[in-house]
Image (spheres, grey):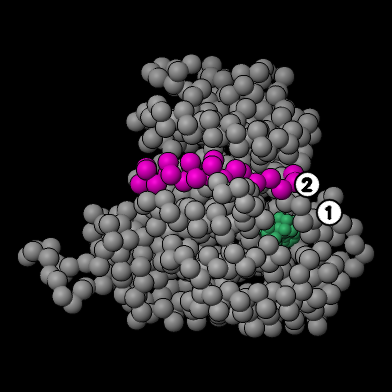
Amino acid sequence: MNGTGEDLKKVFIKTYGCQMNVYDSERMRDALAPAGYVAADTPESADLILINTCHIREKAAEKVYSELGRLRQLKERAALQGREVKIGVAGCVAQAEGEEIVRRAGAVDIVVGPQSYHRLPELIAASRPGHPAVETEFAVAEKFAVLDRIAAERNSNPSPEGGRWLREAETEGVARTDPTHRPSAGPPSPFRGGMSSPRVAAFLTVQEGCDKFCTFCVVPYTRGSEVSRAVASIVAEATRLAGEGVREVTLLGQNVNAWHGVGPDGRAWGLGQLLFRLAEIPGLDRLRYTTSHPRDMDDALIAAHRDLDALMPYLHLPVQSGSDRILAAMNRRHTRSHYLHLVDKIRAARPDIALAGDFIVGFPGETEADFADTLSIVDEAGTMGAFTFKYSPRPGTPAATAADQIAEEVKNERLYRLQAKIDARQAAFMGSRVGTKAEVLFERRGREPGQIVGRSPWLMPVHVDAPATLLGSIGRVVITGAGTNSLFATIAPTAADVLPAGLGPALEIAH
Ligand code: SAM
Ligand code: SF4
């Protein structure tokens, strides 16, 4: 199939979980494009429905099985109309459950783990009614190699259809199912709820998997051990993105600052050196990375925060707990004082940095005194926003079988107190922006007429009264108001220049 005319088939991808999954869904589309698949608007109109699952969520597997029950009915209705619909399960639940999915959910045709998305076309072709295709091998390096090849092929043979499709990331379910376990939205997230068109901000996976084995976490089991993507491959993808008009790239990894490689100079590089190299790419004005681990925050990375204007002053650096006793039980490999010392160094390098994190309350054995340490580290570190989680046992992880599990009411109460503190700090940070100027990357039209939405350096969205002609540019705005999760602004007029009549004041815009 060549992907033209009547050969076109439709795929609907429902994405759950983190930005790694959002990125992976884009890669699945990349892998399916050569096999003639284009995006479907709804599951009902699709020939292939993929659910990209997240295992961090509570009762994740059970929720996937009930979703599959609904999709089975959809598949049966389509069959009555003479249409074949295939159903695939991807992501961490696919990796963890494997054949069990096929056993429990008969309607499933494909089960594919995060390392094997490049094999989707052949898995689809191999699956037959009653004979699903299951692929959950770990082969991360191969996955990166194939992604490079797909990107290269697309570069040499760009099609208008493919280009349009790639820009319209289908991300249904992400915001709703973001694994925050908290009712409010959490800190700003690099995830864009629906990509801008044309796309000006993009994700780029540089690292997969994790070797840290925190005792609460499934990632080392579902995503496998840590693998870094080669420098040349990352630079090639970033250059291609810049060529397509992307101005902001967020580097992704489960443990992104564990990334390591060999630079063109033959030396060992860490994420800091990589960021310096990426900042040289013409057109890439803004860089971010997520999610990082305190243990991997080395001096070169801190120097990048000091020296690189392109590296935005926002850092998601999860601490999980403020208690050394709990941090040890979590196998976090850092202490409270190590974290606070690190934050001091980062602030010395980049005083305007906005610090966000992840916290878990109610980890087995957590006492009221331990929790008080968590509350106090929020203030001492100056945390601006956080995803807060109630500890939830994950089968197969060491903490799940610990004897001293915490009662649900206690977890709820601690979560409430922690959220209240973080919400207050977030509100104070947002309020402190009002009246200041900031550079904003304008990404998409706003809901209100005459409004566009961009990203501040600190990641939260900024709603600006400005014409859509500014989309894709970076402009200086004056912050006029603050909501819970977003800011409001007007374009900053320059004192000196005035545009020709009818066009309003000159804008401080960097095109
Ligand atoms: N690698 C990152 C780090 O170490 O900070 C975090 C990645 S993890 C996918 C995202 C967050 O989910 C964690 O930071 C943690 O707060 C939360 N999380 C993971 N497992 C959890 C569990 N069993 N219960 C509650 N929260 C959990
Ligand atoms: Fe999970 Fe992050 Fe710990 Fe790795 S470092 S085990 S991804 S929480």
Mark 2 lies on residue: 221
Residue 109 locus on image (x, y percent): 67, 26
187 or 303, which lies in front?
Answer: 303
The magenta-colored residue range is 224-245
Residue 468 locus on image (x, y percent): 25, 55
Residue 371 locus on image (x, y percent): 76, 78
Q: Residue at x 78, y 31 (%)?
A: 99
- For ligand 1, tell me if the residue under mark 1 lies within 8 Å: yes
**Position of 81 relative to 262 (above/below):** above
Mark 1 lies on residue: 397
Q: Residues within 10 Å of mark 2 (few under 14, many from 20)?
A: some
Secondary structure at numbered mark 1: loop
What's the amino acid at mark 2?
Tyr
Q: Is residue 481 visible?
A: yes
Does the stretch in magenta take in 435?
no
Q: Residue at x 73, y 33 (%)?
A: 136
154 or 108, which lies in front?
Answer: 154
Q: Residue at x 83, y 54 (%)?
A: 397
Residue 456 locus on image (x, y percent): 41, 66
What's the amino acid at mark 1?
Thr
What's the CA distance linking mark 2 and mark 1?
9 Å
